[in-house]
Amino acid sequence: MRPLLICLLLGFALPASAQIYKYTDASGNTVFTDQPPEGQATQNVELPETNSVTMQPPSVPPATEPSASDAAPYTTLQLADIPDDEAMRANNGTFSIGVTIEPRLASNHRLRLLLDGKPHGQPSNVPRLQVNNADRGEHSLAVEVLSNGQSIQQSATSTFTVQRVNTSSPALRPPAAPSPPQPKPQPPATPKTAT
């Protein structure tokens, strides 16, 4: 109830505060105010309408048919050499991935891997790319075609698992070297007696 009363009072006060008065003070200065001074002759200042702009509905560009240059330039773009059911063994996290591409890669295009959705490695014009230092666990991998640094086509994403052996595992430690054989102690010599 209280917020409603405050809103109503503010609604009535806003039009009243919009009135502006003009008068000349004792020093001859012209003064504009929203409250007329007592004992001074004032003039009401009529303000012009405030500027307002009506919003135009956005224009929709006409639909155009995609041209041949807008279509994907490669009919086949996919990753090769990724294991399907088993983990990829890469103890240092480095391995290479093949790319199947048809037609042949254009001279001004480059290939770049996307590891877990992020660019990985340098763009290359060779259809064999290398993944470096991938952490163990599950990853997603795709390849994209770049033209002047801009992606123009991307392959389907493949999911695979990297298996890295933990080098601090006790199973990987070399066996302890056998200790050198200790010489057997000799029995104490018995003195020989003369007979």
Image (cartoon, helix red, strand yellow):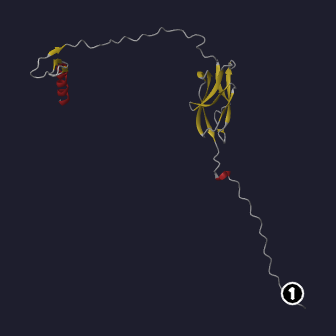
126 left or right of 21 in image: right
Q: Residue at x 12, y 22 (%)?
A: 37
Residue 59, image x, y percentages: 42, 10
Quadrant where the image shows the C terminus = bottom right
* SS at mark 1 in the image: loop
Considering depth in this image, is 61 or 66 the residue closer to the camera?
Answer: 61
Residue 139, image x, y percentages: 58, 35
Considering depth in this image, is 98 or 30 the residue closer to the camera?
Answer: 30
Judging by the rendered image, the residue that carries numbered circle 1 is 192
151 left or right of 46 in image: right
* Residue found at the far right of this picture: 195
- Amino acid type assigned to the residue bearing label 1 in the image: Lys
Residue 144, image x, y percentages: 61, 24
Residue 53, placed above or below residue 164: above
Considering depth in this image, is 138 or 143 the residue closer to the camera?
Answer: 143
Q: Residues within 10 Å of mark 1 (few under 14, many from 20)?
A: few
* Residue found at the far bottom of this picture: 195
6 left or right of 139 in image: left
Residue 23, placed above or below residue 186: above
Q: Residue at x 78, y 75 (%)?
A: 185
| The image quarter in which residue 30 lies | top left
Residue 88, placed above or below residue 103: below
Q: Residue at x 9, y 21 (%)?
A: 39
Quadrant where the image shows the N terminus = top left
Residue 112, image x, y percentages: 63, 27
Q: Residue at x 62, y 22 (%)?
A: 145
* Residue found at the far front of this picture: 27
Tally of numbered discs = 1
| The image quarter in which residue 164 lies | top right
